[in-house]
Amino acid sequence: MFTHLGQRQGNLIEQMDIEDADCKQLEQTYADFYTLNRLISRWNRVYAKYIRPHAKKIQRQGNIFKVCDVGCGGGDIAFLLFKWLKKDGINAHIIGIDIDDRAIAWAKANRKVLAETAQVNNKKKTVGLFFECISTTELARRNYKVDLVINNHVLHHIPFDKINPFLTECAVLGTKVICNDLERSSLAYTLFSLCLFPLRFRSSFIYQDGRTSLKKSFRENELDTLSSEGWKVERLFPFRLLLIYEGEHGLA
């Protein structure tokens, strides 16, 4: 069962990315992400350490906290983030974007949050969770700006030669960017293969695609080499990497 993951296998394709993927399995995959990501993605830790302090700073400045979740899939991370921010009394406007219209259609139907109006600096501002089928390229072209750009398990999906342009677009969109992804590890692959995921997620692509994702993911030095000035790589236990950007390209 042990598999040595030395060389990154970036050419592999995950089942959920196939254009004619089984619709029922794909929709179950979006649904299962909500459970899986709460178990392994450590966004609660990322929120506490990186996002909440940034959001509170924006709120103290009298502004709505604006977030863009890139490659949002079924919208589970954006949905969780909105709930955490609301619990902390922070007004947020979150948009989840994805270039796969199947994901956006599912997110709109299953991760609904009613839009509300907040009074900010004597002006009424819309807060809530929204989804749109659009690319970072198009948002950058529109000069769209947010306080935070996030993505979860997106980097390893992107062709190698397009990663740097993607990171540049994310940095143009937001003053802070957090990319949360898997760290390629033979031990992680073995543990994932031996656990009960095939039973719990037998109706979705989670198990098969999870193993593929680990083969496609990066190691710390690889991400560090990919990233340019303003970016830093941090490890997040267990078997995760954060690629973080802080700059002045987005909203102050």
Image (cartoon, helix red, strand yellow):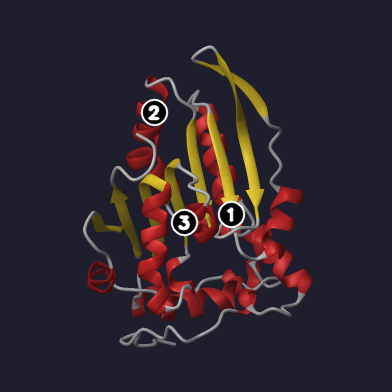
Residue wearing tag 1:
97
Residue 39's spot in the image, x, y percent? 50, 55
The amino acid at mark 1 is Ile
In the image, is 134 to the left or to the right of 20?
left
Residue 13's spot in the image, x, y percent? 55, 83
Q: Name the disc covering residue 130, or none.
A: none
Q: Name the disc covering residue 151, or none.
A: 3
Residue 42's spot in the image, x, y percent? 42, 52
Q: Earlier in the sequence, mark 3 or mark 2?
A: 2
Residue for point 50% across, 45% down: 144
Check disc 2 and report its element: helix, strand or loop: helix
Image quadrant holding the C terminus, namely top left
Q: Who is closer to the viewer here, 193 or 31? A: 31
Q: Do callouts 3 and 2 mark residues in contact (Cβ within 8 Å)?
A: no
Residue for point 34% across, 32% down: 53
Image quadrant holding the N terminus, namely bottom left
Q: Earlier in the sequence, mark 2 or mark 1?
A: 2
**Residue most extreme to the top:** 122
- The CA distance from mark 3 to mark 1 is 10 Å
Residue wearing tag 2:
58
- The CA distance from mark 3 to mark 2 is 20 Å
- The CA distance from mark 2 to mark 1 is 22 Å
Work out whether residue 237 can be spotted: no
Work out whether residue 40 can be spotted: yes
Q: Residues within 10 Å of mark 3 (few under 14, many from 20)?
A: many
Residue 58, relative to residue 105: is it above or below? above
Q: Look at discs 3 and 1 and give the one toward the viewer.
A: 1
The amino acid at mark 3 is Asn
